[in-house]
Image (cartoon, grey):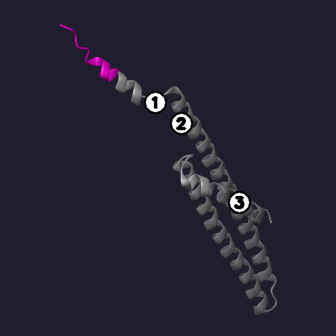
Amino acid sequence: MASLNVTEPLNVAQHTFLPTYEAVRRGGDCFSKNQDKIIDAMQVFASGWFERRHAGVRAALKAAELMFKAEAPAELMRGYQDWANGVVQRAITDGEAYRLQLMTVATALAGPGSVASKSEGALLQAEASAAMRSNAA
């Protein structure tokens, strides 16, 4: 009577479905690159946010000085209007920066082969560059 080796099919299945070293290495590389992208995007977002807060404080001080020196109600209102316009502009820029941050995270989580990562990658880079230029101005 021949012996029946019942573990052989299980061994074949195990080797078939176990990830290879190369697949694990690629996954680890992808994970670390995505983490770097997310952290870099968070740093850009936070730096921009703080720059806008500093600009807001300076604008409020300038508006207060203008309003205290105003000799007519129209000058007072102009100082207030300039400050309020800056508040709205900074809020819009905050929203746009937040949107870019969310898109960066979503693209990184989508993975390297996804449609989102390919199509959004170039868009995110262009938008981030434009946001940095507008913040510098």
Relative placement, left or right, of 97 versus 17 is: right
Question: Residue 104: which numbered mark, if any?
Answer: none
Q: Quadrant of residue 16?
A: top left
x and y, in percent, of residue 29 in the image: 59, 36
Please say if 135 is above or below 8: below
Q: Residue at x 53, y 36 (%)?
A: 27
x and y, in percent, of residue 89 in the image: 69, 73
Q: Residue at x 51, y 31 (%)?
A: 24
Where disc 3 sits, the SS reads helix
Please name the amino acid that badge 1 sits on. Answer: Pro
Please name the amino acid that badge 3 sits on. Answer: Ala
Relative placement, left or right, of 110 versus 39 is: left
Q: Residue at x 63, y 66 (%)?
A: 96
Read off the residue under disc 1: 19
Read off the residue under disc 3: 126
In the picture, the quarter occupied by the C terminus is: bottom right
x and y, in percent, of residue 119 in the image: 61, 57
Read off the residue under disc 2: 27
Q: Residues within 10 Å of mark 2 (few under 14, many from 20)?
A: some
